[in-house]
Amino acid sequence: MGAIVNSPEPMSRMRVITSRDRTAHALKVLQKSGVLHVEESTELKPADLDAIEKERRQVSELLTGIEDVLKSVPAEQVVKVKQDVDVYFTRPVEETSAETRALCARLAAMDRRARKLQDEKSALVELKSVAAALADRTDLTVADLSFSGEHLFSRLAALPQHVFAAVGAQLEPLTLSRETVTLGENTYALVIGKSSRLDTVEAWVRDNGGRILPAPKEPTPLREFVSTSDQMIARLDGDASVIFGDIRKQTMDNLETLLLLREALFAENDRLGVLEKATNARYVTLIEGWVPVSAVEKASGDLREEVGYVYIDTRPPTESEQPPTKQRNSKVLSPFEIIVNLFGTPKYREWDPTPIVAVSFTIFYGIMLGDVVYAICVLLIAKYALPRLVDDPYTEGFRKFQILLSMSAVAGLVVGLLSGTYLGDFLQKFLHLPSLALSATVQAVYSNTLTFILVSLVIGIVHVNIGHILMFIRGIREGKKYIIVERLGLWMLQIFGIPWIFHFIGHDLLPLSAYGYSILLYVVYVAIVLLIVGSIMERGKFLGSIFWVFDITGILGDVMSYARLAGVGLATYYLAYCFNLMSVLIASLLPEGIVRIVLGTLVTIVILLFGHTLNVALGAITCFAHSIRLCFVEFLFKFYEGGGRTYSPLRIRKRDLIPVQAKS
């Protein structure tokens, strides 16, 4: 689609909050950046203070995350910074936050995994100690230390020794048996009781500051578990050590980045702190507007670097908002935005038809002008004459118009070279030169009126239907069924109706039998039904049952309108031809001899200069007007609305040449 239509540049709503004493400086920075399309600012609300406070909390959390990561640095370090520090201080805080989160999250996840292994190791060491003490008293297995059955349960509870000494007797009525072991500061009780009392026992343990020790679900005797658990403890310890070593390595590898991120977050935290206080005291200014998404990072960086104490919030536009339209066409196509904007600036969410309009306008202008000398004259007019007709020929808009007209004239130059047209038939009539046409095919089209008209109509059919295709795609995107039905009907009417009409007048376009052409006629009837249905869906039963006729006459009129390509092209040629012929005929009426030679030559030159100058002026204006008409009426109306707002950023308008009007 990029070769036919374009889409405006995505925009982002930017809000800039800064202290009042820095407002002028912030505006100068924004003007220098030249990307903010300023809109009317709303008043600062409590939500603005909340946003600043929220962002400051997020920055504080990120700083805490970095500090936690830096704890794994083995010893005091002095880091020599090699990276560009300004990059970290001026880039958007969202980018700094994202990089910080990504880096810290990875290292934090590794730390959690290592600490989980350490906790498993500690729990296993504790369980081994208890199991060793119980192994001499019972012949239980490890699984028996944590058992839940239909009638009985067993749990291994750990409580501080002094607590158990004070309240341990309370377990007696809750359990069937108890086996206690005192190790260090804890007393471990292996209790067995009825399943109905399990929740009560567990709640009692928690309420008294105790905990239930988990135990593997393995039928391994306690003595065997004690002798084999050392290997598992060593493995867990080794795995945790490997991960901690990897954390230290990655931390040291990214130490410079971590420190730069920390410094950038420190600076952001300071800025937000100042703005938070200023907002509370209402000593702040709010500037807001639209910025192209591609320029948000640079604009934010410039503000942070040069203004300092500034809060920047950006968000995409909502469905109800209509941001200004910044057209993004190449330098070659951008001059033709003038034509599109004459019809209407594209809406933000609408296609920009500049690419197809640029191609169409240039081709139409070239076909209608179609003369090498006339095209060169238009180029000279655009370069030297037009600047004298305006007050300020150095504006961007005028320069774009010059380029547009020059590119159109170049198209006329190319067509003139292909058809061999130089001031009409000047070369043949006055210099008796053979045709200089570079293309016999193009020359044949221009020399045969009927062929020229047919070619123009074919161009019209293609151009008009490109507009209908774009409207068909738009109908699908917007879910408008009547557009889809109507366009299908129009295409079927053309594809099957045109061959049938030619067959009807006695010129078969397709090698079909009479029965085949009858089938084409039935398809035409179906196409008409689709047009009627689509018209009723769009306009209602009464108007829809009438206005479908205008869909047929409309496309016929649109296509026939392209005959103006041949009409203006032939008129340009034959006017030149007539002036050439007139100069010869009038000169031949003078008496023979020296009078005819001198006076006849003078008359010929005057007629040629006047006639061709007039023809160049008429051609330049007429070709421009008819090219615009074909692009507007026959094409853009098919799918394009316009009505958008032009992107006009606050910027410093630098000009190399500035005219100064002399006082009269």
Image (spheres, grey):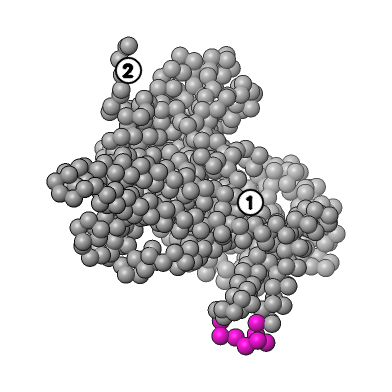
**Looking at the picture, does residue 179 appear above or below residue 349?**
below
Residue 515 belongs to the span the image colors magenta = yes
Relative side of 90 to 16, left or right: left
Residue 364 belongs to the span the image colors magenta = no
Q: Position of residue 94 (x, y in %)?
A: 48, 39
Q: Position of residue 531 (x, y in %)?
A: 72, 63
**Looking at the picture, does residue 422 appear above or below residue 235?**
above
Relative side of 173 to 42, left or right: right
Q: Could you tell me which residue is drawn at 73 percent across and 46 percent down?
A: 206
Pointer 1: what residue? 182
Pointer 2: what residue? 661
Q: Is residue 25 visible?
A: yes
**Looking at the picture, does residue 284 appear above or below residue 499?**
above
| Residue 286, picture quadrant | top right
Q: Earlier in the sequence, mark 1 or mark 2?
A: 1
Q: Could you tell me which residue is drawn at 48 percent across and 63 percent down?
A: 453
Q: Residue furthest top?
A: 664
- Residue placed most toward the observer, 145 or 443: 443
- Residue placed most toward the observer, 27 or 504: 504
Mark 2, Cα crowd under 10 Å, few <14 / some 14-19 / many 20+, is few
Q: Position of residue 497 (x, y in %)?
A: 64, 72
Q: Position of residue 433 (x, y in %)?
A: 21, 62
Mark 1, Cα crowd under 10 Å, few <14 / some 14-19 / many 20+, is some
> Is label 2 in a helix, a strand or a loop?
loop
| Residue 120, picture quadrant | bottom right
Q: Look at the image and give the residue range highlighted in magenta.
A: 510-517
